[in-house]
Amino acid sequence: MFSILRCSFSFALSILLTCTAHAQGNLLTNGAFELGNTGFSSDATFSPGPFLAFGEYTVGTEASVFNGGWAQSDHTSGSGNFLIVDGISGAPTVAWRNSIALALGQTYTFRAYVNNIVSGQQIADPVMELRVNGATIAGPLSLPESPDEWQELSGTFVASSAMTLLEVVSTSTAFNGNDFGIDDVSLVAAGGPECFLFFGSEALAPNATGVDHLLTVPAIVTPVSLLEEMPVFNIPNDVRLQGTHLYVQVYMANPGVFPEDPIKMSNGLDITLGANKYPKPFGPSSGLELWGQSKTPLGGTIEVQFAIGTSGESAAPRLGLSMADPVDL
């Protein structure tokens, strides 16, 4: 049984991850806007719709809902939320703004995806910039109506103050046009964090206390993304796997953001295939919380997620974020 399972997981983990360096270690809350209108401010005025006027914004899944002359879905998955903005007339629009405490002297990458949401009208295009403490680090980037595609704005900077102001700005002041979407805003420290998912068939020190414990023998180690999509595994409908235990843990090394204590270890998860129950957390954590998001019947899926948590807290199942497309074992 173990040899079948090991071969299956070796194959799956060799091809699985949909994570990208862009999303890894995002220090911003709600950069993909899946939590709605929270985690940022704007010079535009929030409106729930059903129609957006000049100088208003909303968070939604499809731009055409708020204006018949618009057409755009989100960058993350094509079905999730994004920031939809009708630009301010006569002045630049700081559409997204956030202040964050950063480590002095640390290098960071600030990134956002932007798109012109106007459809087939050939009017004024948005011109987008990324700014840090008022200085432009990416752009200006003009967004044409055609081709209709999300474009990346990205720039690096060295933190020089205790609080850093981040902004996504349209410098266009046009009355007609200047309508745009923003999605997947991220801030990542250079060189980290480095996160890895450990899969094994043997649990170590299941009753351990303290922090930074290795809780499974890592037969397979693979990089994963923090607070973004995680792999989903399809469990074969094979009775030979019934009752098989898998043990999962996440390791992170992040000296850029946690210079005093860069090593973070999650609790472990005991996954029983074919048991039709949620994975069982075990062991201590040192700053990462790992939980299961689905029961694991044969023919079902394995879905896990993790996030930065409070060191030393006992693990507990919880709801999490969206998953990647399933991968067959």
Image: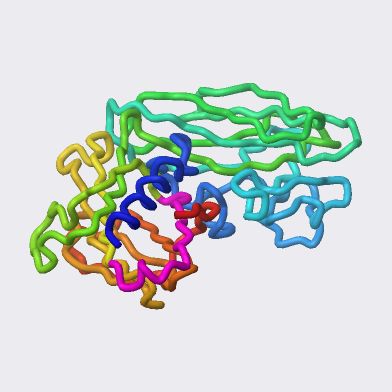
Is 231 included in the stretch rendered in magenta?
A: yes
The answer to which of 54 and 317 lies nearer the viewer is 317
161 lies left or right of 266: right
Q: Is residue 282 above or below residue 65?
A: below
| Res 160 seen here | no
The answer to which of 326 and 292 lies nearer the viewer is 326
Is 43 included in the stretch rendered in magenta?
A: no
Majority secondary structure in the magenta region: loop
> Which residue is at 10% across, 68% downward?
207
219 lies left or right of 328: left
Instruction: Point out the residue furthest to the right here.
Output: 121
> Which residue is at 44% across, 54% downward?
329
Instruction: Point out the residue furthest to the bottom here.
Output: 276
Q: Which residues are magenta?
A: 227-244
Q: Looking at the rendering, which quadrant does residue 126 occupy?
A: top right
The answer to which of 168 and 242 lies nearer the viewer is 242
Query: For the N terminus, which image quadrant?
Result: bottom left
Q: Position of residue 23 (x, y in %)?
A: 46, 41
Q: Looking at the rendering, which quadrant does residue 27 occupy?
A: top left
The answer to which of 246 and 44 lies nearer the viewer is 246
> Which residue is at 62% across, 34% downward?
169
> Which residue is at 43% across, 29% downward?
109
Q: How has the structure been colored for display?
A: rainbow
Q: Is residue 139 above or below residue 308?
A: above
Q: Position of residue 284 (x, y in %)?
A: 16, 63
Q: Position of residue 171 (x, y in %)?
A: 68, 28
192 lies left or right of 170: left
Q: Position of residue 269 (x, y in %)?
A: 27, 64
| Res 4 seen here | yes
Total label count? 0
